[in-house]
Image: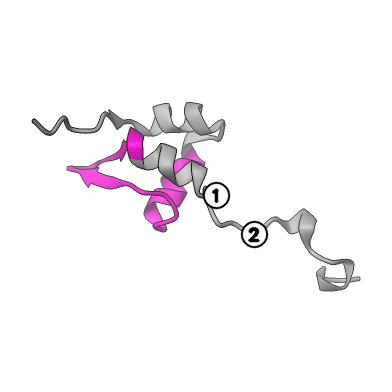
Amino acid sequence: MNVPSELLTVDEVADFLRVKPSTVYEWAKNGKIPARKVGRLWRFSREEIESWTRSGGPQVENPSSARPNDRPGE
């Protein structure tokens, strides 16, 4: 028997990742996090989120890691 993966809400994923729910919504909308829409609601597979975090999580640019010459006005 194939047991379905537990589905998490935006708030549960935000708590797990220690980010704001608005960040989770943005990542889901932009395809940066494994997610699916169920009606109007976003849902996340616990297995997929755990795998995603092990593989590096969101690929977002970190402004503090930019070289000084890359910053505007410097």
Give coordinates of residue 50: x percent, y percent.
Answer: 43, 37
Left or right of 74 in this view: 47: left
- Indicate which label's residue lies in the foreground, 2 or 1: 1
Q: Residues within 10 Å of mark 1 (few under 14, many from 20)?
A: few
Foreground: 60 or 3?
3
Relative vertical location of residue 29 with respect to residue 16 in this rendering, above or below: below
Picture quarter with the N terminus: top left
Identify the element where label 1 is drawn.
Answer: loop
Q: Please tell me which residue is depicted at 52% across the width and 33% down the height of the picture.
A: 17
Residue type at the position of mark 1: Gly
Relative vertical location of residue 54 with respect to residue 10 in this rendering, above or below: below
Give coordinates of residue 11: x percent, y percent.
Answer: 41, 28
Left or right of 41 in this view: 54: right
Give coordinates of residue 13: x percent, y percent.
Answer: 43, 32
Residue 34's label in the rendered image is none
Q: Please tell me which residue is depicted at 55% across the width and 49% down the height of the picture.
A: 56
Residue named by callout 2: 61
Q: Is residue 39 within the magenta segment?
A: yes
Residue type at the position of mark 2: Glu
Quarter of image, res 29 = bottom left
Q: Is residue 37 within the magenta segment?
A: yes
- Residues drawn in magenta: 22-47
Residue 56's label in the rendered image is 1
- Nearer-N-terminus badge (2/1): 1
